Amino acid sequence: VTDLSLLPLFASLALPGSAAPPPDTVQMLARIEILSRELEELKAQVAAQQAANTPPPPPPPPLPISAQAPPARPLNLWGYGEAYLTMPTRVDGLAQADLARAVFGIGYQFSDATRFNSEFEVEHAVSSSSDPGEFEVEQFYVDQNLGGAVSAQIGLFLIPTGLLNEHHEPTNFYGVQRNFVETLIIPSTWREGGVSVEGDHSGVSWAAGLTTGLDLSRWSFHAPPPRTALELEDQDNAPMQATHQELALAAVHGPSGFLSARFHGIPGLTVGASLFAGDAVPPSPSPAAHVTLWEGHCRYEPGRWDLSALYARGTFTGTAPANLAEPGAPNPLPAAFFGWYLQGAFRALQRGDFRLVPFVRYEVYDMGARYEGLSGSPPPSSYVPRDHVFTFGANVYVNPGVVLKWDVQAFQWNQDFTRVDLSLGLSF
Amino acid sequence: VRFNPVHIVLLAPAGLLGPTLYATDYLTPAEAQRILFPEATDFASRPLVLDPEQTTQLREQVHLDPSRVQLVLATRQGEPVGYVLVDQVVGKTLLITYAVGFSTDKTIRGIEILSYRETHGGEVREKAWRRQFVGKTAASPLRLGDDIRNISGATLSCAHLTEGVRRLAALVAVGLP
């Protein structure tokens, strides 16, 4: 069409400048002129029609759907921490405030299937030779997906036991401090070095691993008795808490391993169990030692309720020769220890992210359920390595990542441990 | 300690950890579409056309950026039977890619997890947990601890996926015919 519109111009250019055109040429030019006008009219009509009938231009096509999108950044940071104020109510002068832990995690995604996770922890705010704090590597492992829901870990990782050990952030548990059973019997946060495989199928998640084990030669037969519940949790008086090695120049005396399984096929219900067993570095002068810890747990979260129960029991072999070698020691090495608790929490108030969750917990622990090879009499002490503890309090979630806590704890045997606690916890 | 050969055999699985073996993708979008709408004969990507007011409403009410959501129309012999929306949420630190099927009456038909990248919390792939969403709409609470129950140990993934589904339900209520 555009080319035809130029015909009159071409025709005029073809004519000599001053010469008069012959009559047939004049007719032809006139006809071309008419055709040209008709053509312009037709073009205008077509354009008008198109404007009336044509739908608006289609929007750009949607982005291709892809499940392969990698995370925007392969490096991830996270963290959690908690600060306490703990006030014994029966003994003056033992109240303490503590930035109990500040933990920061670094993860790196090498590929869709290979990931590195680590957590670094500062306990008690300041770590130096003259301060009470510690700097610890809490996790340091590579996770390799083996296809589907099966993966393997190698490095320093958490043992999948109980309700708290793998989920120990302050936003995940009720009360200022972790419960005693999952501190003194299960030594949360318990990690070992090794290799493990885990998977999740048909509502059951499972894990199995080969790891480093415990060193019973680290047991302190003359450890001073704790004066407060805070000291009880911090001083390594507990059987496994005092003897796990955390991959710090860990002595490898033989293989240790674990199995765990957890059913979560009914929404809101979790039922699980785990077993850890292995050779341990024996306490002098024992020739050999073996460690076993097993536990079963259950958590049910119907509606506003959060109900949980846990039982754990551990045994050490090879303790008799060591105890015989320390007659009358105030802190003999136990051959068996156990604990259990029942806990109920109720979401009493929720406004957006704000939640008020009061709770109660009753727990029993005995770090010396059985001894072998005791001789002599230990020095008199008001402290005993067992108790029945009743706790009530509330978690106040400012948002899912920030929690203020308050609780009161009463002890049946070590009554001087009775206390009121406050804390700030956070996790991101 | 002296290790005997049995110990070495037990440790052998560590040697299997080579370079990338498999991805963490469980379903392709096409597979998820067929699971959510097995009766459909055709699936076609559709642009999500929202007016500025709808976009603002979604951003302010449910904090959803509609531009990142991908929409597929499921039809059976030319008749619409529902929509599939694909989106992503953060689990703890990594993205979970998921698809939600909505019937034409805007009720949730089902949820499928396409990709899960975290090392923990993958229990949200459990069918019984995902089934809790079926039949719910934007008018449902769609809140963890209310009408959606938690999986202990996978709380962050459960919470964030529930929030994501709530956002998509709002998008369907506001933006689809």
Image (cartoon, coloured by chain):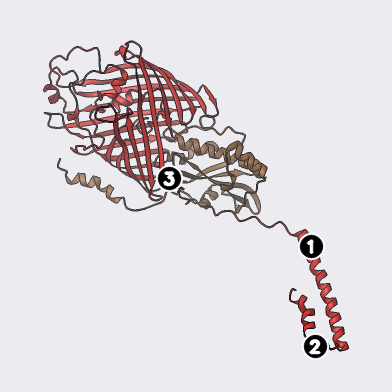
Pointer 1 chain: A
What type is the residue that disc 2 sits on?
Answer: Pro
What is the number of the mark on residue A49?
1
Q: Looking at this rendering, what residue extends furthest in the front direction?
A: A18
Could you tell me residue A239's position as x and y percent? 24, 26
In the rendered image, residues at marks 1 and 2 fall on the same chain: yes
Q: Mark 3 — residue?
A: B117
Pointer 3 chain: B
Q: Is residue A235 left or right of residue A323?
A: right
Q: Secondary structure at mark 1?
A: helix
What is the number of the mark on residue A16?
2
What is the number of the mark on residue A20?
none
**From the image, which quarter does the C terminus of chain B lie in?**
top right
Q: Say above or below: B29 vs B140.
A: below
Q: Nearer the viewer, residue B171 or B21?
A: B171
In the rendered image, residues at marks 1 and 3 fall on the same chain: no
Dividing the picture into quadrants, the one containing residue A154 is: top left
Q: Is residue A324 visible?
A: yes
What type is the residue that disc 1 sits on?
Answer: Gln
| Classed neighbour count for the residue bearing mark 1: other residues with Cα under 10 Å, few (<14), some (14–19), many (≥20) | few
Chain B colour is brown
What type is the residue that disc 3 sits on?
Answer: Arg
Q: What is the distance, in whole Å, between disc 3 and disc 2 at their CAs?
A: 82 Å
Could you tell me residue A260's position as x and y percent? 33, 36
Q: Identify the residue shown where x is 46% and y is 41%.
A: B125
Chain coloured red in this rendering: A
Q: What is the distance, in whole Å, between disc 1 and disc 3 at their CAs?
A: 55 Å
